[in-house]
Image (tube, helix red, strand yellow):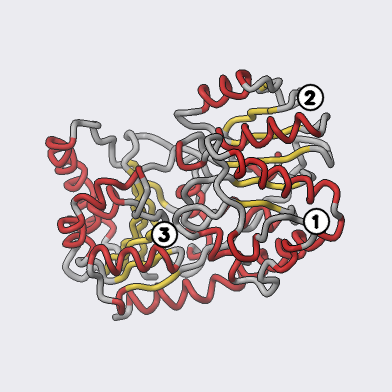
């Protein structure tokens, strides 16, 4: 069997990139020998269970930028040694650090590919990829193929790094939610968010929206699934906004922080709606998960274009959003909620109120979720990935 190696910075947290990688490994493991390498500490185990062979290569020291390349040398040597042992036919990397290591350790007969899942332009997390576009472009032009998760990200790679269009393409993933017992009872007054507590996910914007919504409609609860560096500050912000807060899943508090979960769907079943307020999104896998669970959802038109691209693929074309509202999501979608722009908060509250009180609007959103779940089903995606891998390894 042909061998595929995935390389990613980390596999020890419950994040979207980690879930994406495990999902792809699950998709391909019946047809190829799948290996995963990460830059986690030696002996680490992945948070998500996987049938792939896992190789933690050791952590890189987070030195200042001028000396960071020195730390990469050791990591590159370990990855190169692993490649010599495994002899992968195709190595696929995710995120810049893994992409750099993959390019530096390219073997003679090995094909290398990158999965571009995060937008670069106007993304504070990727400022260096903009500033040093010339050097970054040299790295990415070594790849045989770059697969972007949205057309917007594909165009960014084409224009920023002068990538040959024949080496660029779009890829899809799938979501297959685990059928497990719900951790929370069905509750028509419960809303849910899932994502890491980082700047890009904009949990603070969601908290301001929910505070405003709760002032008008009592007895509602917001469940926040996820961990991250900003979690403590988000808990403090919720308290400062006058919202009751708890980390106990049995609590009736207005905002419930349940932390990272291997199967977040257990806390999503039965919710009134899924809310995604991100500033930046490639293609939000968690939104596809919410759709697979049959949840109506509201999502900000974030940088990266992932939400807009996801919705553009459905036959509904968002016409249902025009009904009974002063804003038109069919043209602009929901804005990213920003406390400095009260109108953005008000638009979100109006949309949540429509889900609460407009049965037709809610049913149309449920139909939209059904369409998305079909587009991103395992059956519809697997053939594309088998074709891609076979094309790469047999060239």
Mark-to-mark CA distance, 2 and 3: 44 Å
Query: Quick one: 98 or 212, which is closer to the camera?
Result: 212
The percent coordinates of residue 308 (x first, y second) are 55, 62
Which label is found at residue 362? 1
Q: In the rendered image of this protein, does residue 39 appear above or below residue 304?
A: above
Foreground label between 1 and 2: 1
- Quick one: quadrant of the C terminus? bottom left
Q: Position of residue 99 (x, y in %)?
A: 28, 55
Query: Where is residue 32, by image quadrant?
Result: bottom left
Q: Secondary structure at mark 3?
A: strand
x and y, in percent, of residue 266 in the image: 71, 41
> Label 2, on which residue?
252
Give me the residue at 53% from left, 32% from top: 227
Residue 34 circle label? 3
Residue at 20% in and 71% down: 109
Among the two numbered marks 1 and 2 on one chain, the one whose residue lies closer to the N terminus: 2
In the rendered image, which quarter contains the N terminus?
A: bottom left
Q: Report the side of 228 relative to 73 (left or right).
A: right
Q: Can see residue 51?
A: no
Tell me: 383 left or right of 290: left
């Amino acid at each position: 069997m042909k061998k595929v190696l995935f390389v990613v910075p980390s596999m020890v947290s419950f994040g979207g990139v980690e879930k994406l990688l495990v999902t792809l490994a699950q998709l391909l493991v019946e047809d190829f020998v799948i290996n995963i390498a990460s830059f986690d500490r030696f002996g680490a185990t992945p948070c998500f269970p996987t049938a792939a062979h896992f190789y933690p290569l050791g952590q890189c020291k987070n030195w200042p930028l001028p000396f960071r390349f020195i730390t990469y040398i050791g990591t590159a040597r370990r990855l190169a040694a692993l490649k010599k042992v495994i002899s992968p036919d195709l190595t696929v990397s995710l995120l810049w650090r893994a992409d750099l290591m993959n390019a530096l350790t390219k073997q003679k007969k090995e094909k290398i590919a990158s999965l571009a899942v995060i937008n670069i332009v106007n993304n504070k997390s990727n400022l260096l990829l903009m500033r040093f576009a010339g050097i970054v472009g040299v790295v990415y032009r070594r790849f045989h193929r770059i697969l972007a998760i949205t057309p917007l990200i594909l165009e960014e790679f084409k224009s920023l790094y002068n990538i040959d269009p024949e080496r660029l393409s779009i890829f899809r993933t799938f979501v297959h939610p685990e059928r497990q017992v719900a951790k929370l009872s069905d509750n028509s007054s419960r809303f849910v968010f899932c994502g890491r507590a980082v700047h890009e996910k904009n949990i603070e914007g969601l908290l301001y929206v929910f505070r405003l919504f709760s002032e008008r409609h009592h007895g509602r609860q917001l469940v926040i699934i996820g961990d991250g560096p900003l979690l403590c500050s988000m808990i403090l912000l919720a308290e400062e906004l006058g919202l009751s807060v708890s980390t106990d899943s049995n609590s009736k508090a207005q905002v419930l922080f349940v932390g990272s979960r291997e199967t977040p769907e257990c806390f999503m079943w039965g919710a009134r709606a899924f809310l995604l307020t991100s500033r930046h999104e490639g293609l939000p896998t968690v939104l596809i998960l919410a759709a697979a669970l049959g949840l109506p959802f509201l999502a900000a038109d974030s940088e990266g274009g992932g939400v807009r691209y996801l919705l553009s693929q459905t036959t509904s074309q968002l016409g249902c959003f025009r009904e009974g509202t002063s804003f038109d999501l069919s043209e602009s979608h929901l804005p990213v909620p920003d406390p400095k722009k009260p109108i953005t908060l008000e638009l979100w509250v109006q949309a949540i109120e429509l889900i609460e009180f407009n049965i037709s609007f809610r049913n149309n959103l449920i139909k939209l979720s059904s369409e998305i779940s079909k587009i991103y089903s395992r059956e519809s995606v697997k053939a594309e990935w088998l074709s891609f891998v076979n094309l790469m390894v047999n060239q």
